[in-house]
Image (tube, grey):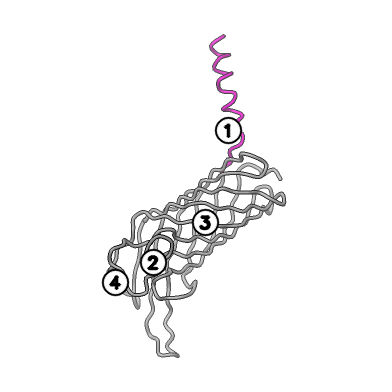
């Protein structure tokens, strides 16, 4: 009996701490470009989907870890009316793992910021519908950052807008190509993504 009581007293703080955790799923769409590839504009359409777990540490502050499939890349569409017959498509598939700090204000609005690990799952690089070899290979793991704003529509459903931008070049350095940019720490190409998402909390969010 005494052993059971000791175990219960030991587990009680863990049980109360676990009540602060929440989980859920998310999905959305995005538009993207690659800064440094000479093509301007958010012309590449992609999507993302995954799951998350969050820990609320105070009334205003929480931390959230996500794991999701995420499409990024770049696109240039031909314009025959102007004599431009070439099109280009770069589609990059990532396993993305963000770790975010979220600050809640106005009861149901959240600002969020944090780093993101991008693990390369695959890619397609092509001109005029034909795949071409990459002159500079994509990194298998790279780093990005997220800055976003979100709002709870209901105690379970939340809509969010995010800027997702590379902190490190997405291609291996050492062989600079025309158009590469120097941003942050090195010269190269950088994912630049705007996304809209909907997420569903399994546990009701307390306003």
Mark 1 or 3, which is nearer the eye? 3
Q: Earlier in the sequence, mark 4 or mark 1?
A: 1
Q: Secondary structure at mark 3?
A: strand
Inspect the magenta stretch and tell me whether residue 135 lies in it: no
Inspect the magenta stretch and tell me whether residue 13 lies in it: yes
Q: Is residue 185 above or below residue 131?
A: above
Residue under pointer 3? 146
Mark 2 or 4, which is nearer the eye? 2
Q: Quadrant of the C terminus?
A: top right
Range of magenta residues: 1-23
| Residue at 48% from the left image edge and 61% from the top image edge | 165
| Residue at 31% from the left image edge and 74% from the top image edge | 130
| Residue at 72% from the left image edge and 52% from the top image edge | 106
Residue under pointer 4? 132
Q: CA distance from mark 4 to mark 3?
A: 31 Å
Residue under pointer 2? 189
Q: Secondary structure at mark 1?
A: helix
Image coords of residue 128 (percent x, y): 35, 78
Disc 1 vs disc 3: Cβ atoms closer than 8 Å? no
Residue 123 located left or right of residue 159 = left
Residue under pointer 1? 18
């Amino acid at each position: 009996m005494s052993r059971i009581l000791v175990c219960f007293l030991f587990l009680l703080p863990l049980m109360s701490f676990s009540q602060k955790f929440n989980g859920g799923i998310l999905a959305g769409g995005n538009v993207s470009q690659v800064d440094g590839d000479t093509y301007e504009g958010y012309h590449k359409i992609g999507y993302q989907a995954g799951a998350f777990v969050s820990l609320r540490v105070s009334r205003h502050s929480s931390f959230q870890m996500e794991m999701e499939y995420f499409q990024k890349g770049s696109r240039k569409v031909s314009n025959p009316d102007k004599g431009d017959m070439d099109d280009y498509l770069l589609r990059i598939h990532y396993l993305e793992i963000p770790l975010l700090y979220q600050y809640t204000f106005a009861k149901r609005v959240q600002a969020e910021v944090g780093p993101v690990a991008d693990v390369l799952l695959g890619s397609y690089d092509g001109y005029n519908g034909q795949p071409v070899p990459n002159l500079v290979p994509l990194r298998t793991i790279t780093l990005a950052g997220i800055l976003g704003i979100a709002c709870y529509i209901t105690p379970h459903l939340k809509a969010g807008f995010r800027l997702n931008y590379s902190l490190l070049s997405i291609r291996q350095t050492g062989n600079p190509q025309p158009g590469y940019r120097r941003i942050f720490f090195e010269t190269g190409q950088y994912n630049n993504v705007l996304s809209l998402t909907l997420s569903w909390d399994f546990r009701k969010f307390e306003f």
